[in-house]
Image: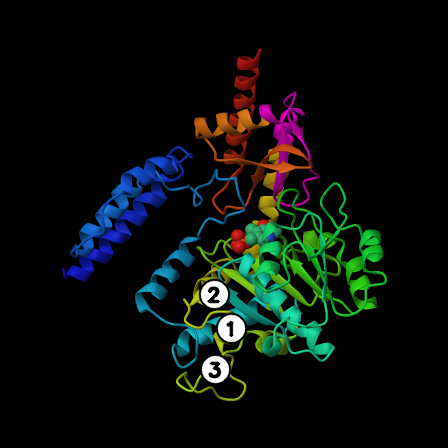
Amino acid sequence: MTELDQLFDKAKAYALAYRKEVAVKPSTPLSYATMRERVAAPLPESGTESGAIIDELVALTDGGLMPTVGPRFFAWVMGSSHPAGVAADWLVTAWGQNAGYQGTSPAMAAIEEIAERWLLELLGLPLDSAIGFCTGATLANGTCLAAARTGVLRKVGWDADADGLFGAPPVHVLVGADAHTSVHSALQLIGFGSRRVIAVDTDAQGRIVPAALEQAIAGLEGPKIIISQAGQINTGDFDPFDAIADIAAAHDAWLHVDGAIGLWAMATPSLKHLVGGLARADSWATDGHKWLQVPYDSGLAIVRDKDALLHAMTQWASYLPTIAQGDRVPSNYVPELSRRARGAAVWALLKAYGREGIVKMVERHCALARRFAERLRTEPGIRVLNEVVLNQIIVDFGADSDATKAVIAEVQKDGVLFAGGAQWRGSWVMRLSVISAPTTEADIDMSADAIIAAWRAVQARGA
Ligand SMILES: *Cc1c(COP(=O)(O)O)cnc(C)c1O
């Protein structure tokens, strides 16, 4: 065996051991403080043999990894890094491809292009839309909104990409009051400011109220962008897109959708009632590393007006590979030039599931979420606070936030599952996201029992 054989075999053996153990190990990792202490060391002055580095990396991180690839991780909306995607990503790394251009990796440019086509077909979005493969929905929101900025300002004769926003006609940005924080971060990044937006009232499920949007937009002059949402981070619910798209059309506004979680409902016939009008938007952001189970990191920025996206993202210099007319240049769809071949893992997951498999998985997770909610509802004192229309559940343990925090702490200490909390409508809730491919009914039942037991323990201590 060569040294390379040994090194890659070692990495493979460690990876296999981890994936085999993750379902049976405690779900709560050691603390960050413990990890910091363990890894603290002076800067290496000389080099170390590669195999020893891998041994050390595994030893140092042992117990400190979050079991996101396991079956009972519900704290955040994180997919499970499907084996097909992991293996494809290993190859991408081993091949060391820079997927910025056709000229830097013809194969990866072609793979990304076919993945783009498949995604548009799967999601039922206009086939001439463009998709930028980026790191996550935060950057996907930013990429889409940069295209929106370019698009709405070009319409009034202003070139934001050349002249910036200095002295530009003001752009009105209307956002649902329960938008994800990443939307505000994206607006901040592209020069719109996170505070200088018009927040539109939402209902109990966090959905934009169309009458409130109509009222907010009436009388606004000049360029406008409306940001709506498919899959609210706590309730999982969807804005009423048909009504919003009508308003956007009547006011000539660019309609963007943050669909980090919920865009996959577009592929799922039984969820069609949630997504009516969603395809009428101008841009959509989603994640590969959530419902599609692509390994980290994978975001998708989808824009109907390809021209606006290219105008906002293209960079060029004479030393860069020459491109033929009509070539799809991957780096012109995202903010980066040199970049990982993110399309390969997306391509692998679309092959691993196929359209049917994705529909089945989404439906299965929604059914598991309903089951989870039903199980929890049977216990006195546990309240399910949302209408479970997708994969997201929020519960509390009475109106006292301290009780909810105590139950979360107890669940984490216990280690059967991993769940976290958030503030919703002014008090603390436990958030449960059913999103991992390996989660079964048995995992849901075991987790519901553990939450109920934790709640009983907290009550017993309090009494
Ligand atoms: C997760 C999420 C985001 C942010 O996505 P990242 O991949 O973490 O950048 C944005 N919006 C919603 C609704 C999300 O669930």
Residue at 57% across / 16% down in the picture? Answer: 459
Q: Separation of disc 1 and disc 2 at Cα?
A: 8 Å
Q: Count neighbours of disc 3 (C-alpha within 10 A) and say few if under 14, some if 14 to 19, many if 20 or more.
A: few
- Where's residue 42, x and y in %? 22, 47
Three-letter amino acid code at the position of disc 2: Trp
**Stretch in magenta:** 374-403
* In the image, farthest residue toward the left: 1
- For residue 393: magenta? yes
Q: CA distance from mark 3 to mark 2?
A: 27 Å
- Residue for badge 3: 316
Q: Residues within 10 Å of mark 2 (few under 14, many from 20)?
A: many
Q: Are marks 1 and 2 in contact (CB under 8 Å)?
A: yes
Residue 400 vs 428, above or below: the answer is: above
- Residue annotated with mark 2: 347
Compared to 463, does 307 lie above or below?
below
Residue 74 percent coordinates (x, y): 52, 39
Q: Position of residue 432 (x, y in %)?
A: 57, 38
Instruction: Note whether ligand 1 is within 8 Å of mark 3.
Output: no
- Farthest front residue? 167
Using the rendered image of the protein, determine whether residue 336 is visible from the camera's viewpoint.
yes
Cβ at disc 2 under 8 Å from ligand 1: no
User: Disc 1 to disc 3, how far (Cα)?
Assistant: 24 Å
443 left or right of 276 in image? left
